[in-house]
Amino acid sequence: MQMAGDEAEHTRTANFLQDSNRGTCSRPSNLITLIHPRRTSLPNPSFNMGNLISSVRHSSTSKSNHPEAVVFSQQDITETLKPEGYNDRDHGRITWKTLFSSDRTSTSALTAGIATCPPRREGQPRTFGGHLAPHRHAHPKIYFVIRGSGVVNVEMIEHRVEAGSVVFIPGNAEHSVRNESLTEDFVFHYCFAADSFKDVKYRFTNDSGAMGRMSTSNR
């Protein structure tokens, strides 16, 4: 009896396939369920592979219109990006290279760069070593230490940091940075939640103006 049932099912399936070729098939629900559990009707007869290929090509074209990543190699950072900085007691002795800023790169929402505080010579006071003088700005900021060690002062509290350390500085908090090493640069990555570095208004504690002067700047 089981064999007869299987043969009957096989016959119905064969008839369905033959009718499909003639375009006159009736719908055996058990076969459709087997092919696609969610399908409740036969595929749209107007569907063809050409339409599918056209759709895929359109999707591929659309993806190319999405914003692209901006990538700098180590060589780009070292040889192409221009250093800027301060070199005075009011603002500090520090250089930096801007990585991402909307006035220079096809980026938005974040501004980032790499800063370097050089070591001081033995016998020199701290202010002669590499440092960024006390200042504030409305934008919060993150420091990530790449190389060396130093001190980050936030609201008169000193935090000793080294390679691998990360610091979050709240908006409008007074802060400063200094390198106390006699031999090694203090290098750190910084990032603001701002489209451009121009949007970040520095207010130096020792500066009579509202914003510190950039000693070597093409901003």
Image: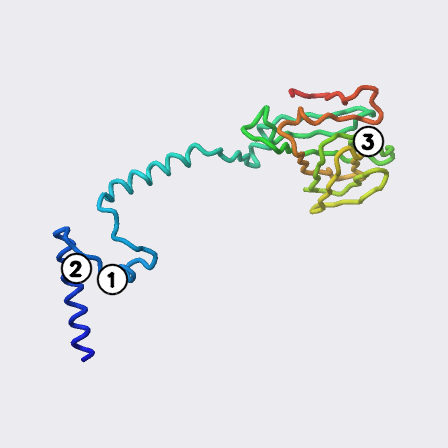
The amino acid type, in three-letter code, at marker 3 is Pro
Residue underneath mark 3: 134
The amino acid type, in three-letter code, at marker 2 is Phe
Q: Nearer the viewer, mark 1 or mark 3?
A: 1
Q: Which mark is residue 16?
A: 2
Tell me residue 198's x, y (percent).
Answer: 67, 24
Instruction: Please tell me how crowded label 1 is: few (under 14), some (14-19), or many (20+) other residues with Cα within 10 Å.
Output: some
Q: Earlier in the sequence, mark 2 or mark 3?
A: 2
* Above or below for 210 versus 191: above
Q: Nearer the viewer, mark 2 or mark 3?
A: 2
SS at badge 1: helix
- Identify which residue is drawn at 75% across, 20% down: 213
In the visual, does 26 lie left or right of 112? left
SS at badge 3: strand
Whole-number angstrom distance, CA of label 1 to CA of label 3:
76 Å
Instruction: Please tell me how crowded label 2 is: few (under 14), some (14-19), or many (20+) other residues with Cα within 10 Å.
Output: some
Q: How is the image coloured?
A: rainbow
- Identify which residue is drawn at 31% across, 58% down: 36
Q: Which mark is residue 196?
A: none
* In front of the other: 101 or 139: 139
Residue underneath mark 1: 31
* In front of the other: 104 or 74: 104
* Above or below for 22 versus 84: below
- Identify which residue is drawn at 75% across, 26% down: 202
Whole-number angstrom distance, CA of label 2 to CA of label 1:
9 Å
Tell me residue 96's x, y (percent).
Answer: 68, 30
> Residue 119 lies in what quarter of the image?
top right
Q: Earlier in the sequence, mark 2 or mark 1?
A: 2
The amino acid type, in three-letter code, at marker 1 is Leu
